Image (tube, coloured by chain):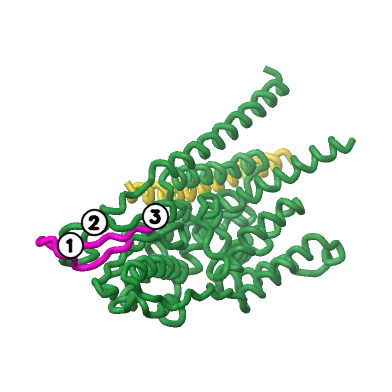
Amino acid sequence: MSPNQIKLITKYANRILILLAVISLAAAWVYGHVAHREPVEHYLPGALGNAADFHLIHADTDNELYLFDGRDTNGDPVGYITVTHGRGYGGPMMVVVGWSLQGSIYTVRVPQHREDWPWFHILDAKKFYDQYIGRKDTDRLHLGRDIDAVTGASRSAHGVAEGVLKARELVAKKLGHRIPPSEKPAISFGAAEILLFLGLALVLMFRTLRVLNKVPFRRSLLLGFGFIVVGIWLQHPLSLVNFTTWMMGYAPPWQSNIWLYGLVLGVPALTLILGKNCYCFWFCPFSAVQEGAHLLTGSKVRPGRTCGKALRTVRYILLWLALFLAFSFHNPSLTVYEPWTALFTLKGTTGLWILVAVTLGSALVVHNFWCSYLCPVGAILELLLKAHSTITSLWQKRKR
Amino acid sequence: MAKAKALNIMKERLSDIVVTGLVLIAAVISGIVVFLKALALL
């Protein structure tokens, strides 16, 4: 077989593989949406201690709002149970609230969620739910003012609070109570947002303006900026789970997540429009950590061109695997496997910590180890770069 | 000259082996992290 024939076969085999990957992901997405409808009745026992029987008295299946009354063994009503949903970090969470007949909260539970355990557990540890116990449906329940948010699990706390507010409306309507006027969610735009957008603007300038090419250590400066702002302060580098939550239709409320919207929509948009990666190797805090580790040893171990090219496909395989499982199980949190989630928040499973150790150890030897061969975010941005060059070449062909 | 060339090739091969080994180890751990999470949901 001639080298040209081998090249042609490889080209078509690659195309077929890509097509199969896309079809399997689409099938997993559809399956996940159809198969994972949770029967809410399963989660009612325990919400009202002395209730033995439950009757559905209101259901809004489109918005997933349910109101039940609970009765004791004699058939006498003992209270109400609401089942609602809020938007957490990894997607929607089911919030089950037990109410007295007068509209006071007995219990708040989250039996179904898509949050990662090391962070979600903080809500329990800091007794977040206890703040709601004894409150009435007519009380103000604004998170951040009437209910304290929880540092380290603020997005999960927002999800629970959203679920409780929806529950309160159901109960108040049933009891004919007037609830405090709903407040518009506060728009959070402060130093974090300003610094993040400033950082992205600086990267954009350094990547596009030729005049700035001569500025010494420009990449190191921007990496240091990203490390301090995105890594240490916000503790939230761009992660695959941000893309998966969006892909599954679980975008968090924009009012309290402007910086996240800037990161998740801004970075891919810049990549697609400019055809330049404005995040990896320029602003990613984990890249900064790895480059710092590599500076310590100055190791010159690097694979040959063919081997390096083959190894870079590993990140696409991991990306496909994580997306396939997340879509099939309808759970974005399955895509949280990047080592920085543990490194910057100092919380994580044993598996994640082992991965942190292996990655940082390898980064001492191989330059930008994770970013070059394993990062799923890098893989997504690389795909966008390919999309940019395909669109550009098609456009130029059409112009001719 | 030939000796230096052979040494270079050997160094390159060794680098290939080291990087491949490290990438595979990290990839397997990443895969295990994801699979364990999925298993916990079953």
Residue drawn where x is 27% and y is 60% of the image: A68
**Dot label at residue A71:** 1
Q: Earlier in the sequence, mark 1 or mark 2?
A: 2
Chain under numbered label 3: A
| Image coords of residue A304 (percent x, y) | 65, 43
Residue extent of the magenta highlight: A64-82
Chain under numbered label 1: A
Q: Earlier in the sequence, mark 2 or mark 3?
A: 2
Chain under numbered label 2: A
Task: Name the residue carrying label 2.
Answer: A55
The colour chain B appears in is yellow
Which residue is more in the foreground, A23 or A288?
A23
Residue drawn where x is 59% and y is 34% of the image: A18
- Please, which residue is most extreme toward the left here? A74
Q: Is residue A386 toward the left or the right of residue A314 in the image?
A: right
Q: Does mark 3 fall on the same chain as mark 2?
A: yes
Task: Name the residue carrying label 3.
Answer: A60
Q: Secondary structure at mark 1?
A: strand
The colour chain A appears in is green
Residue drawn where x is 46% and y is 79% of the image: A144
Q: CA distance from mark 2 to mark 3?
A: 15 Å
Q: Secondary structure at mark 2?
A: strand
Tell me the quadrant of the picture where the C terminus of chain A can be found. top right
- Please, which residue is most extreme toward the front here? A176
